[in-house]
Amino acid sequence: MRVCIVFLLCLAGQAFTASITEEEPIIDDVVEEAQPEVGANPVQVEIGDFDEAIDVVEEEEDITENPCLNHHCKKGKVCEVDEENTPMCVCQDPTTCPAAVGEFEHVCATDNTTYDSSCHFFAQKCSLEGTKKGHKLHLDYIGPCKVIEACMDAELNEFPLRMRDWLKNVLVSLYERDEENNLLTEKQTLRVKKIYENEKRLQAGEHTLDLLAHDFEKNYNMYIFPVHWQFGQLDQHPVDGFLSHTELAPLRAPLIPMEHCTTRFFEQCDADNDKYIALEEWANCFSIKEEDVNKDLVI
Ligand SMILES: *[C@@H]1O[C@H](CO)[C@@H](O)[C@H](O)[C@H]1NC(C)=O
Ligand SMILES: [Ca+2]
Ligand SMILES: [Ca+2]
């Protein structure tokens, strides 16, 4: 289980992240509007562009005529025009979802039901919109539903150690590869540069938990920004200082099948149990001290 999370996320993220990043708003009723582009989370950055998966509606028809062009709908909905030729978002018929190519496209929902693909899942969720069942139904993880071993307390404590190290390494590798300055913003680059150039930095690789714990103590400051950064990558729909279940999904869903403590970890992050992870809760989960939690680092 010590296998580096880096791998897990990059690989597992592939088929999936793109298809869930166009998020639904927190309140199920506030719908229909175009969503802003999601920021690059580590998973997406690793896998590059999957834009074609997102813009289902466009192309095909005459650019000048089609009011659905540029009318984005959230996942599970497609654009149709009414009698007045006004575009609107309606639930997608699951049978119009592309057939899943393989098991890796299957997703497991929180009701422990396997769906052929995230498209099928979101179409189904849409059809339950307004119902209690629909409200509680979320995409849980990538892949068919399976038995996930219980996470023991000791294992739960290992999780943030590896996750923090991974976040730092992702940022450093983005920095190293950012020749065209499009992976990180200027502000982010400045922050990461300091980490990158620090000679005491623990290089990426397989490390024992003891070493990771020791490094966190010794080089605590290097971990503050990466933890904030990841929060900012996820907090996009809307940008409000809270992570909803859906906002967390791009990080969480690829991880669960391989890291059986994922669910428990993020559950306990939500210390006040309001179903949202606030920046303070997030930082605390990664043992960032309260006085070091800083909204201005979410850049
Ligand atoms: C979820 O479904 C899988 C596969 O059908 C099954 O093996 C597993 O026991 C189920 N888990 C729960 C908690 O019901
Ligand atoms: Ca948010
Ligand atoms: Ca909370």
Image: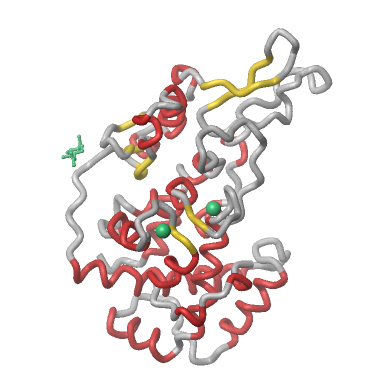
**Image quadrant in which the C terminus is located:** bottom right
Q: Front-most of 213 and 282?
A: 282
Q: Front-most of 123 and 254?
A: 123
Q: Front-most of 46 and 123?
A: 123
Q: Is residue 92 left or right of residue 112?
A: right
The quarter of the displayed image where residue 7 is located: bottom left
**Image quadrant in which the N terminus is located:** bottom left
**Residue drawn at x 45%, y 27% as measured from the top left:** 129
At which x and y percent is residue 187?
69, 72
**Residue drawn at x 51%, y 57% as measured from the top left:** 242
Q: How many marks?
A: 0
Q: Is residue 38 left or right of residue 126?
A: right
At which x and y percent is residue 9?
42, 57
**Residue drawn at x 70%, y 61% as measured from the top left:** 182
At which x and y percent is residue 103?
33, 35
- From what the image shows, is residue 156 above or below residue 246? below
Residue lying at the far right of the rendered structure: 64
**Residue drawn at x 66%, y 45% as measured from the top left:** 36
Q: Is residue 255 left or right of residue 14?
A: left
> Quadrant holding ligand 3?
bottom left
At which x and y percent is residue 218?
41, 91
- From what the image shows, is residue 227 above or below residue 106? below
